[in-house]
C-alpha cells in the first residue's frame, strides 16, 4: 500500500497519510493482514475507533452527570461524581483502579495506562503484554502508543491476539465489531468505512 491509497482509503490528507504509511505497512506485514479484505477491515475498524486516525488518546473529559451514566457503579450519585467533574486524570485513576494490572486510585496507574492507540490499549497488564510482543518498554514509555508506529502496531497486536483475520475473511462485520468494541456501537459507520477502503484497495 502506498500513501496515496491510504489517503483515499481513509479520506485523509496526503500529508497525514505520509505520517502513517510506514506504520500501517509494518503492521500489515507483521500480523498477516495480507489481503485487501483484511486490510480494509483493519483500516475501517481503526478509523472508526480513532475518529479517522486523529484521536490516539482516550477522552475522559466527562461531566458529573455523564459519569453517573457511563460508570453508574463507580459513580452511583451526582454527589459522588461531582469531585471528578471534567477532571480526566482523576476520572481515569478512579475508573481503572485495581483492574487490568493497575494499582489503586492513588497509584496514578489509571491515567498512566489509559486508552491509547488506534484500538485503545488500556491497563498496565495490556501495555506490558503488548510491549513484550513488540520489543518495546511500553510500561515505562506508555506515550509511545500515541505515536503512529506504536498506535498501529498495538492495534495489530490486538487484532492478532483476538484472531480477527478470520472474521475479516468471512466478512463478518458484526462479530468483528463485537470483538473490538464489546458491542455493535457504530456498526454502520464501521461497515461504510470498510467498504470504502475495499473499493480503493481493489481498484
Image: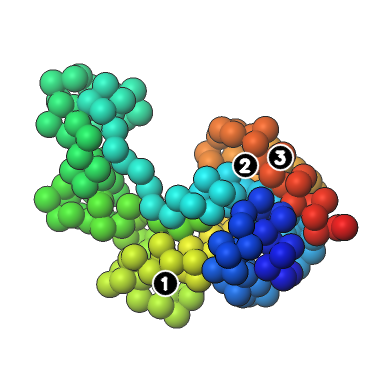
Q: CA distance from mark 2 to mark 1?
A: 24 Å
Q: Position of residue 189 (x, y in %)?
A: 65, 36
Left/right placement of residue 67 relative to residue 32 reads left
Q: CA distance from mark 1 to mark 3?
A: 30 Å
Q: Position of residue 117 (x, y in %)?
A: 46, 58
Q: Say which residue label 3 marks.
A: 191
Q: Which mark is first along the chain, 3 or 2?
A: 2
- Label 1 Cα neighbours within 10 Å, binned few <14 / some 14-19 / many ≥20: many
Q: CA distance from mark 2 to mark 3?
A: 9 Å
Query: Do we see residue 160 in this rendering?
Result: no
Q: Say which residue label 2 marks.
A: 177
**Do residues under tags 1 and 3 come within 8 Å of each other at their CB atoms?**
no
Q: Which mark is first along the chain, 1 or 2?
A: 1
In this figure, which colouring scheme has been used for the structure? rainbow
Q: Nearer the viewer, residue 51 or 172?
A: 51
- Vertical order, 20 against 76 (above or below): below
Quarter of the image where one finds residue 30 = bottom right
Q: What number is the disc on residue 47?
A: none
- Label 3 Cα neighbours within 10 Å, binned few <14 / some 14-19 / many ≥20: many
Q: Position of residue 196 (x, y in %)?
A: 76, 46
* In this view, the mark in front (1 or 3): 3
Name the secondary structure under disc 1: helix
Name the secondary structure under disc 2: helix
Name the secondary structure under disc 3: helix
Q: Which mark is first along the chain, 3 or 1?
A: 1
Q: Say which residue label 1 marks.
A: 131
Q: Residue at x 60, y 74 (%)?
A: 22
Amino acid at each position: 500500500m502506498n500513501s496515496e491509497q491510504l489517503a483515499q482509503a481513509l479520506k485523509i490528507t496526503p500529508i497525514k497519510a505520509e505520517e502513517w504509511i510506514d506504520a500501517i505497512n509494518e503492521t500489515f506485514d507483521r500480523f498477516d493482514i495480507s489481503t485487501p479484505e483484511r486490510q480494509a477491515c483493519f483500516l475501517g475498524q481503526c478509523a472508526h475507533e480513532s475518529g479517522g486516525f486523529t484521536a490516539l488518546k482516550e477522552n475522559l473529559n466527562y461531566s458529573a452527570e455523564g459519569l453517573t451514566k457511563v460508570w453508574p457503579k463507580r459513580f452511583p450519585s451526582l454527589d459522588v461524581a461531582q469531585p471528578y467533574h471534567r477532571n480526566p486524570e482523576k476520572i481515569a485513576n478512579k475508573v481503572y483502579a485495581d483492574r487490568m494490572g493497575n494499582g489503586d486510585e492513588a497509584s496514578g496507574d489509571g491515567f498512566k495506562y489509559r486508552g491509547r492507540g488506534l484500538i485503545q490499549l488500556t491497563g498496565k497488564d495490556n501495555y506490558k503484554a503488548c510491549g513484550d510482543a513488540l520489543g518495546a518498554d511500553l510500561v515505562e514509555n506508555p506515550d509511545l502508543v500515541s505515536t503512529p508506529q506504536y498506535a498501529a502496531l498495538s492495534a495489530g497486536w490486538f487484532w492478532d491476539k483476538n484472531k480477527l483475520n478470520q472474521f475479516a475473511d468471512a466478512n463478518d462485520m458484526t462479530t468483528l465489531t463485537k470483538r473490538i468494541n464489546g458491542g455493535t456501537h457504530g456498526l454502520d459507520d464501521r461497515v461504510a468505512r470498510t467498504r470504502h477502503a475495499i473499493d480503493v484497495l481493489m481498484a
